[in-house]
Image (cartoon, grey):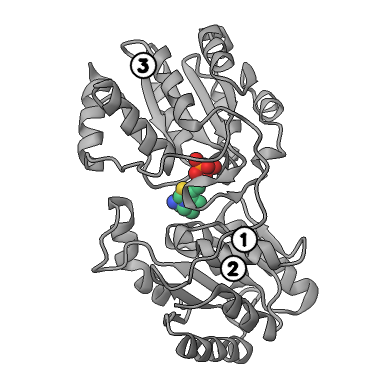
Amino acid sequence: MIRPETFYSWLAGNNIEFFSGVPDSLLKDICAYITDNAPHGNHIIAANEGNAVALASGHHMATGKIPLVYMQNSGIGNAINPLLSLVDKQVYHIPLLMMIGWRGEPGVKDEPQHVTQGAVTLDLLDTIKIPYAVLNDEEEKAGEQIRQAIAEIRRTGIPYALVVRKGTFEKYTIKTSVASDYQLSREIAIQEILDQLTDHDIVVSTTGKTSRELFECREALGQPHHADFLTVGSMGHSGQIALGIALSKPKRRVICIDGDGAVLMHMGGLAITGSMAPGNYIHVVINNGAHESVGGQPTAGALVDLVSIAKANGYKSATSTSTASELSDALSAVTKELCPALIEVKVRIGSRADLGRPTIKPVDNKKDFMRYLDS
Ligand SMILES: Cc1ncc(C[n+]2csc(CCOP(=O)(O)OP(=O)(O)O)c2C)c(N)n1
C-alpha cells in the first residue's frame, strides 16, 4: 500500500502543489492528507468535478504549474465537458494530473450504480484520449509510474490520469476537523420526516448515506419502500427528479431529502424549481457541512445561507432548523401556498457503524415506486 505522505511528497517534489476535486471513498486517505498538509487556498473541494477541472486550469494559467484534479469515476461525466472543450489540446491545451477512484472495477463486488461506470472507466479515458495508468499499490512501482506520468504530461502538455483501485492507499486519519456543533443526527431527522408523512406522499432521497438510512428507517418501522425513490447514483440530481414527479403529480406532496454536497453540486436546479413554483414540493436539505458518505470532507454547506438562496431562487418559503421539534414544526407548517418550500436541517456528522445498504435492486425500487405513483 502507498503511504499518503509518500505520495504527497512525490507530488511536491514535482512542483505539484494545487489540488482540486470532489471526494471519493477510495481516495479518502490521500485526500485527508492533502487537506491537512496543502497550504490554505491550494486545496479546493469543488462543487462538482467539472468545476475542479476549471479551477485547476485557472491555477495552471496563473502559475504555469501542473495541478492535480481528483474524483470518483462517477464524476468523469461531470468533467468531460471542460476536459474536451477547455483543457483539450485543440482548445487551450492545459496539462493536468488526474487521480480517479475506480469504483465498480470489474471483478470487485460493488453497488449497482458503480457496475457499468466501473466497466467503462478505462474505455472512457481511451475515448476522450486521456492516457492513464492503473496505480500500483507497491510504493516503488507507483513512484516510477508517477515519474513517468509527469514526464509524459511535460512532454505532451495534455492530462494524464492515475486510476486508483480500492485499498491502494494506507489509512490516514484526518486532523483538520469539520466544525459541527449540532446535536441532531441525519438518521433522527429522517425518522422525523417519516413521522410527518401522509399516505400519498412521495419521497425522493439523495445519494449516499441519506438513502441508506431512509431504507433502514423504513425497515425498522416495518413499512414498505414503495413511496421512496432512492437516488443511489447521480449525485446532485434528486431535486430535479423530484421536480419532474411533482409537476406530473400536482395533487401529491413530493418531499425531496437532499444533502448539502449534492445541492451545491448542481445548485442551478434550485432556480428551475423556484421558477416552476410547484405547490406540492418540499425540499428538505440535510446540512452537515460535509461529504459525510465518502469520508467527511468539508463542503461549503456550513458557510452558505440556504434560506436566502432558496428565497432568492423563487421558493415561496424557506426555514432553517436544527432540532427534531423545529423540523417537525417546519414540516407541519408547510401549506400549498408556501411551496416550493425549503427546510434546511442542520445536523452533526456521523452515522451508525453498522449502516447497511438497500437490499432491493434499483430497478425493482423503480417498478414499485411507479406503481405507487400510479395508485
Ligand atoms: C458525480 C459524483 N461525484 C462524487 C460522488 C461520490 N459521492 C457519493 S455521496 C457523496 C457525498 C454527498 O455529500 P452530501 O450530499 O453532503 O451528503 P452526506 O454524505 O453528507 O450525507 C459523494 C461525494 C458521486 N456519487 N457522484
| Residue 201: assigned label | 3
Residue 18 position (above or below residue 275): below
Q: Which residue is mark 1?
A: 52
Tell me the kind of residue under disc 1.
Ala
- Helix, strand or loop at label 2? It is strand
| Residue 69: assigned label | 2
Q: Which residue is nearer to you in this view: 61 or 257?
A: 257
User: Which residue shows up at 42% across the image and 13% down it?
Assistant: 196
Q: CA distance from mark 2 to mark 1?
A: 6 Å
Q: Which residue is nearer to you in this view: 153 or 213?
A: 213
Q: CA distance from mark 3 to mark 2?
A: 41 Å
Tell me the kind of residue under disc 2.
Val
Q: Earlier in the sequence, mark 2 or mark 1?
A: 1
Characterize the local packing of mark 1: few (<14), some (14-19) or many (20 or more) Cα atoms within 10 angstroms: many
Left/right placement of residue 338 relative to residue 37 reads left
Q: Which residue is nearer to you in this view: 86 or 263?
A: 263
Marks 2,1: beta carbons within 8 A: yes
Q: CA distance from mark 1 to mark 3?
A: 37 Å
